[in-house]
Structure formats: structure tokens, C-alpha cells
Image: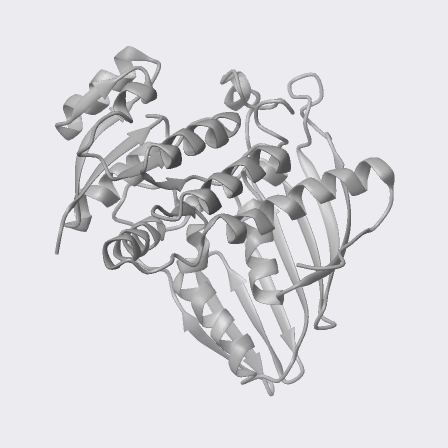
């Protein structure tokens, strides 16, 4: 099978997970990394044996690069992805796909225009064994119809975390705990529940006032077209990074995800359906372990010429819910959808 030439933009914390996944793939050769911090960029390039660029536009001129990983601040995702797509490169961007819906739409338009390349959005938790098992239970109705769900994220981010210039600001991060940390769990809820009929939510800054201009806590109530409902709560001022909790309630039982362990409760008995798998990419435990699975899946779709399912429109769904929670909080009104 052909090997793809790859480059990564943004050598921050998450970059190492992408770079290690690329190295383990056997499907790609890392050609370059890009970062405006020359020291960080050159150190990363030296570590992974590739070229360094300060300007991603110069890197995009190379004909031997097929795939671009975008691992920068949220506000840079859209312009970088659009430039890469227009340069004929496939793009895999970290979540959220952009800092707001308007920027995200420029990515969707570019991807729709340049049909010879693909746009993928990282939501690696969909690839977790437990998540896959939960989706199977919903689709097969092995426990009957899905009735309701809950998602709870209680994490911690210190004031020092926001010393990075783009974090904690509406214009550059696009929000706080919702758009950065808890978007993964919100994405799982909408992936499990299907088409969302309406959402109402509220945000607040409970402990980081004076540090950030965005929210550190949020909650929401979702109604799905199927009739199922969901409640959602997230905060990054808990004090520790506690395991994420997701519960699905069916007509004939419950599935309870705590961290990476999935339990089934039915007829007064309990069973473990999925347990944690080893993390071999150096990721922080609360990031999950499935970046490698998703990156491989994206590359295989590109190499085989198959449309990638977790594409721009699919990645847009979670961003829309996040931004609509913000709008609902400002207006005090429930946001209703007439179509997906």
C-alpha cells in the first residue's frame, strides 16, 4: 500500500499523541512540522526526524505532503484547514473544528468545493471500545428502546492553564469547558441519541472569574427526535480530573460508563462489558486512548479512496450544540431545530 506524506501544524501538548500515532501507523512518512515557536518546532522536528517550518504556507507548497494534521489554537483551525484543502491536502483537525459556527462553515464550504481531498475532525472517544459497544446496544435495541442519557464531566484546569495566549477568550478559544474539554462527551451524547430536536442550557464562571472571560461550568438538557432525552453537566474547576460518566437508560436495563469501564445493569444483575485498554501514545489518561484508532481509520479511508464518516458535517454537529448552549444561556430560551 502507498505511504502518504504527512505534516503537522502546531507542536503543543496534543501534537505528541498525533506524532506517535503517525510513527506507529506504517502508512505514512512524517515530512514536516510547523510551529511559530522556533525552539519548540525545531526540537520536535529533530526528535521525529523531519523538516521544520515557521510558516505553514511554505510547507503547503510541497508536493510530497498529502495529509495535514491541524493541532493549533481553535481560532487557527479554519484558516489553516481551508488553505490546506485549497492546496490539495487532506486535513485531519483537532476538535473543535473551529472556534465558532461561521468559521466552521468556511471549512465545510472548502471541503465541498475540493472533493478530491477529505476533511476529518478528531473525536477520538467515538472509537473507544466502550463507546462502540454502547452504540451497538442502541442500534440493536438489545435492551429495548433508549429512553434517556446523562453525561457528566468534572475536571480541573488551574489558572496557569490559561496563560496560553489563546485560551480563556471568546475570540480565540470560542468558549471554555464546553468547547475545549467537554465537547467530547457532548459529541457522544448526540452520536448516541441521533437527531437533536432541541437544547436548552446555561453557562457560568464559578471559580475562574477574573482569570478567563469564558465559562468554567455548564449544564444542558437535550431532546432527541426519537423521544429520548439527555442531561449534561461539565465543569473544569472540580479540583481533580475525575473519570467521565455516561449513563444510558433503556426499557430493559442500563449501560453505565465510568472512565473507560462499561457496566451493564439488567434484571438485578451487573456485568462488565468493556474494560480499559493500554495507552501507548503517551496521552494523559483523561484524553482517552483512541487517537491512534481514529488516525489509522482516517488514513485508511484516504488511501482506499473511501469517504471518511467523521467528516466536516459530522464534526460540525457537536460544535453547533456547544454554541447553541451559549446562545441559550444568553437568551434564556430553548433552541429548536427544524432539521439536522
Residue 159 position by quadrant: top right
Residue 311 spot, x, y in % from top left: 45, 51
Q: Quadrant of the N terminus?
A: bottom left
Q: Is residue 232 left or right of residue 331?
A: left
Residue 143 spot, x, y in % from top left: 58, 83
Residue 301 position by quadrant: bottom left
- Residue 22's place in the image compared with 263, above or below, is above
- Examine the rendering and report whether any part of residue 120 can be seen: yes
Q: Is residue 326 left or right of residue 310?
A: right
In this view, which residue lies farthest toward the top? 38
> In terms of depth relative to the viewer, which is nearer, 109 or 164?
109
- Examine the rendering and report whether any part of residue 237 can be seen: no
Residue depicted at x 56% and y 47%: 316
Q: Is residue 60 left or right of residue 195?
A: left
Residue 302 spot, x, y in % from top left: 28, 53
Residue depicted at x 46% and y 43%: 113
> In terms of depth relative to the viewer, which is nearer, 302 or 284?
302
Residue depicted at x 73% and y 47%: 219
Residue depicted at x 33% and y 22%: 56
Question: Which colour style is shown?
Answer: one colour
Q: Is residue 292 left or right of residue 205?
A: left
Amino acid at each position: 500500500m502507498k505511504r502518504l506524506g504527512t505534516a503537522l501544524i502546531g507542536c503543543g501538548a496534543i501534537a505528541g499523541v498525533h506524532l506517535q500515532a503517525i510513527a506507529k501507523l506504517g502508512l505514512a512518512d512524517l515530512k514536516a512540522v510547523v510551529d511559530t515557536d522556533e525552539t519548540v518546532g525545531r526540537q520536535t522536528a529533530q526528535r521525529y526526524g523531519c523538516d521544520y517550518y515557521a510558516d505553514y504556507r511554505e510547507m503547503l507548497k510541497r508536493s510530497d505532503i498529502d495529509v495535514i494534521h491541524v493541532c493549533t489554537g481553535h481560532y487557527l483551525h479554519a484558516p489553516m484547514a481551508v488553505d490546506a484543502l485549497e492546496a490539495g491536502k487532506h486535513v485531519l483537525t483537532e476538535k473543535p473544528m473551529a472556534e465558532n459556527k461561521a468559521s466552521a462553515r468556511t471549512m465545510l464550504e472548502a471541503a465541498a468545493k475540493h472533493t478530491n481531498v477529505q476533511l476529518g475532525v478528531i473525536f477520538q472517544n467515538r472509537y473507544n471500545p466502550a463507546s462502540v459497544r454502547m452504540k451497538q446496544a442502541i442500534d440493536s435495541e438489545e435492551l429495548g428502546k433508549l429512553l434517556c442519557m446523562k453525561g457528566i464531566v468534572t475536571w480541573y484546569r488551574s489558572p496557569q492553564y490559561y496563560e496560553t495566549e489563546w485560551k480563556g477568550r471568546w475570540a480565540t478559544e470560542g468558549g471554555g469547558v464546553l468547547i475545549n474539554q467537554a465537547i467530547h462527551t457532548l459529541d457522544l451524547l448526540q452520536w448516541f441519541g441521533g437527531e437533536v430536536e432541541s437544547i436548552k442550557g446555561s453557562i457560568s464562571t464559578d471559580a475562574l472569574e477574573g482569570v478567563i472571560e469564558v465559562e468554567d461550568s455548564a449544564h444542558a438538557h437535550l431532546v432527541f427526535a426519537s423521544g429520548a432525552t439527555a442531561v449534561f453537566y461539565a465543569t473544569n474547576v472540580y479540583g481533580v480530573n475525575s473519570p467521565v460518566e455516561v449513563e444510558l437508560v433503556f426499557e430493559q436495563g442500563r449501560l453505565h460508563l465510568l472512565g473507560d469501564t462499561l457496566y451493564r445493569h439488567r434484571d438485578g444483575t451487573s456485568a462488565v462489558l468493556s474494560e480499559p485498554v493500554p495507552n501507548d501514545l503517551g496521552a494523559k489518561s483523561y484524553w482517552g486512548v483512541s487517537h491512534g484508532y481514529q488516525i489509522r481509520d482516517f488514513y485508511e479511508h484516504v488511501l482506499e479512496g473511501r469517504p471518511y464518516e467523521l467528516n466536516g458535517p459530522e464534526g460540525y454537529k457537536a460544535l453547533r450544540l456547544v454554541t447553541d448552549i451559549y446562545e441559550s444561556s444568553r437568551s434564556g430560551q430553548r433552541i429548536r431545530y427544524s432539521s439536522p
